[in-house]
Amino acid sequence: MANQQAALDTLFHALADPTRRAVIGRLLDGAAPVKRLAEPFAMGLPAFLKHLSVLETSGLIRSEKAGRVRTCYINADRLTAAEHWLAEQRAVWQGRADRLAAFVEAHNPPTT
């Protein structure tokens, strides 16, 4: 359980940054070389590579090097892990909201 929690922490840390989310969004369209991924961002390549490192550590992306070109690929299974956690949380809070609504209605009947 603790190992699973640490993996989720790493995953959500990676998704917390807008640059990294933009990279994930781009990679959902297909694999891309690092140079092309970095083009839209106003930062140096070393700073951008730190973002990619966080994404790789979280398991959201993987990269392969062929010659001088490093290409990044999305790992959609890790996005599914985040989606499952969010769905569980949504179900918990929806249940709580439903119970609260039932309590309020039971204790404050409509007046006519």
Image (spheres, helix red, strand yellow):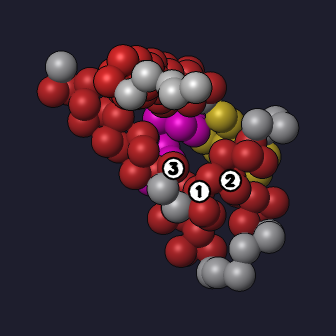
Residue 73 x %, y % = 68, 36
- The mark nearer the N terminus, 3 or 2, is 3
Return the residue nearer the eye: 6 or 62: 6
**Image point 40% across, 51% down: which residue?**
13
**Image point 60% across, 62% down: which residue?**
18
Residue kind at label 2, given as amino acid type: Val
Residue 78 x %, y % = 51, 27
- Determine whether, in the image, residue 28 is placed left or right of residue 24: right
Mark 2–mark 1 CB contact (< 8 Å): yes
Q: Which residue is mark 3?
A: 15
Mark 3–mark 1 CB contact (< 8 Å): yes
Q: Which residue is mark 1?
A: 20
- On the image, which quarter does residue 74 sit in? top right
- Determine whether, in the image, residue 61 is placed left or right of residue 69: left
In whole angstroms, how far apart are the C-alphas of marks 3 and 2? 10 Å
How would you rate the neighbour count of disc 2 (Cα within 10 Å): few for under 14, some for 14-19, many for 20 or more? many
Q: Which residue is mark 2?
A: 23
Residue 9 x %, y % = 31, 42
In whole angstroms, how far apart are the C-alphas of marks 2 and 1? 5 Å
**Image point 80% across, 70% down: which residue?**
40
